[in-house]
Amino acid sequence: MIEDLSKEEHGMSGTVRSKLFDKYLEVWIEEDVSVEYVNLCAKSLSSIDDNLIEVICKAAITYSEDFCEMVGQVPPKIEKMRDILQYVEFGSMLG
């Protein structure tokens, strides 16, 4: 569920707790979007299928390895596929 909801000039902003990423994510809600819809999206985020999570993790690992090679850094050591999720950063999620 959306937390810390506050009215802004052109909508609302708040945060949602992501169990998958083990962090709070910032959300921006346009003025014509209902809070109910945004809460439904937040609920969907928390119930992503394990197969899709695996695909996301594989893509994030590949991106991390390619990016680190490009900038001359050592990629993070990943023991379990979901370990990569701690390195994923977000801007704002739009609703």
Image: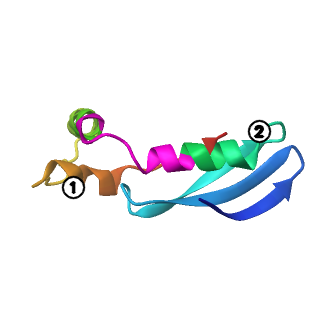
61 or 47, which is in the foreground?
47
Where's residue 12, x and y in %?
79, 51
Residue pointed to by mark 2 = 33
Residue kind at label 1, given as amino acid type: Asp
Image quarter of the N terminus: bottom right
Residue pointed to by mark 1 = 83
- At x 51% / y 49%, what residue is drawn? 43
Marks 2 and 1 in Cβ contact (< 8 Å) = no
6 lies left or right of 93: right
The dominant secondary structure in magenta is: helix
Label 2: which secondary element: loop
Q: Residues within 10 Å of mark 2 (few under 14, many from 20)?
A: few
**In the picture shown, does residue 67 fall above or below 15?**
above
Residue farthest along the right direction in this orientation: 9
Label 1: which secondary element: helix
Residue range corresponding to the magenta coloring: 42-52
Residue 91 seen in render: no
